[in-house]
Amino acid sequence: MQMRFIPTSVHGAVDHVVGPALVLAPTLLRLGRTSPEGLTARAVGGVEAFYSNLTDYELSMKNVVPMKVHLALDAVGGATLALVPQLTGARQRGKKHWLPHLAVGALEVGMAAFTKTEPPRPVERRADTVKKLAKNALKAKVVKDVTQVVAKAIP
């Protein structure tokens, strides 16, 4: 049985929602500006939003960070989210100080464990690239040929 079944495209879509949500969550939950659980959520969300745009998957801006490294960073970020409120005593201040962190942390670790480690590189995508190159080369040849014909026609 294949353990990694979540496509990288789905993982990328989740990343582009979770990162900014973690940055905004402490404000929405009215956590203290300097509370460890608020700072942790903002830091993890900001870092995740940054490296998600550099990861080698379909929805990133640049394909720099390998997917395996991304998944490892997600697992560390998720564990950090889940554990910091427990280790800092935020649990005594109420559920809003630890439950969202535990839920999102578990989601992060689970997504890291079950996401495929390579984005798809379909043959069709490669074939489309070759077709575009051939089409551009043909256009360039046609333009060159037309230019030569026009140059010969004008005395």
Image (cartoon, rainbow, N blue to C red):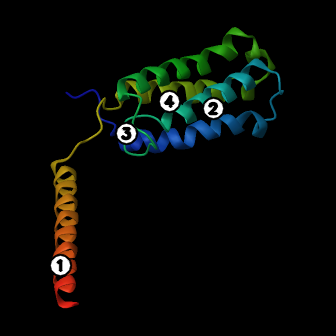
Mark 2 and mark 3 in contact (Cβ < 8 Å)? Answer: no
Q: Which mark is residue 148?
A: 1
Q: Which mark is residue 97?
A: none
Q: Earlier in the sequence, mark 4 or mark 3?
A: 3
Q: Position of residue 94 (x, y in %)?
A: 77, 23
Quadrant into which the C terminus falls: bottom left
| Amino acid type indicated by mark 3 | Tyr
Work out how far the residue at label 4 is from the one at label 3, CA to CA, in angstroms. Answer: 19 Å
Location of residue 86 by image quarter: top right
Q: Which mark is residue 107?
A: 4
- The residue carrying pointer 3 sits among few (fewer than 14), some (14 to 19) or many (20 or more) residues within 10 Å by Cα, namely many
Mark 3 and mark 4 in contact (Cβ < 8 Å)? Answer: no
Q: Earlier in the sequence, mark 3 or mark 2?
A: 2
Of tags 4 and 3, the one toward the viewer is 3
In the picture, measured across the screen, residue 26 lies left or right of residue 122, that is right
Work out how far the residue at label 3 is from the one at label 1, CA to CA, in angstroms. Answer: 45 Å
Work out how far the residue at label 3 is from the one at label 2, CA to CA, in angstroms. Answer: 19 Å
In the picture, measured across the screen, residue 141 lies left or right of residue 88, that is left
Q: Which residue is mark 2?
A: 46
In the picture, measured across the screen, residue 23 lies left or right of residue 134, that is right
Q: Position of residue 45 (x, y in %)?
A: 62, 31
Q: Which mark is residue 57?
A: 3
Of tags 1 and 2, the one toward the viewer is 1
Q: Earlier in the sequence, mark 2 or mark 4?
A: 2
